Amino acid sequence: MAQDFTIMLPNRPGVLADLCTKLGKAGINIEGVSGTQYHDKVIIHILFEETEKAQALLYKNGFTIMSIRDVLVTDIKDKPGELGKFSQKIANAEVNIDFFYLATNNRLVLGVDDVEKATAA
């Protein structure tokens, strides 16, 4: 099962390149990614299939892992209104969406407060 890693990076040139180069050289694929600036840091979410290998590489290289969690990953159509329909189904199941981002192959990644209920919805 894929997992989302929340990682804090310094906000300076080359840090993301360094991280992604190390992952690539280790043969670890980034399935999805999102990032945003927070003060003098960057908070990124990265979706990995090879979670143990990714976690070991990140720790070994001194990257700050803030959290690792199971997420809902689902296909989504690339057309107007699809995210609204999908998120309404999740809301109707009384599941809260903490974060979301797109991954490779038109997949939607959702950090939710109840993965099982969200999956059933």
Image: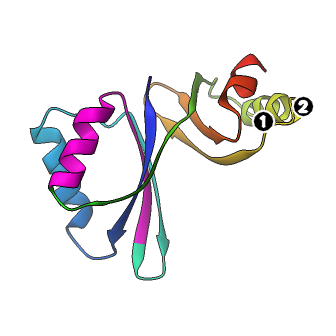
Q: Earlier in the sequence, mark 1 or mark 2?
A: 1
Structural crowding at the residue carrying mark 1, measured as other residues with C-alpha within 10 Å and reported as few (<14), some (14–19) or many (≥20): some
In this figure, which residue is indicated by the disc labeled 1?
87
- In the image, farthest residue toward the bottom: 40
15 lies left or right of 4: left
In this figure, which residue is indicated by the disc labeled 2?
92
Q: Secondary structure at mark 1?
A: helix
Is 85 rendered above or below residue 14?
Answer: above
Instruction: Identify the residue at image location x=90%, y=31%.
Output: 92
- In the image, farthest residue toward the right: 92
Is 28 rendered above or below residue 23?
Answer: above
Query: What's the residue type where badge 2 is placed?
Result: Asn
Q: Position of residue 36 (x, y in %)?
A: 49, 64
Q: Position of residue 43 (x, y in %)?
A: 44, 63
Colour scheme used in the picture? Answer: rainbow
Is 59 rendered above or below residue 40?
Answer: above
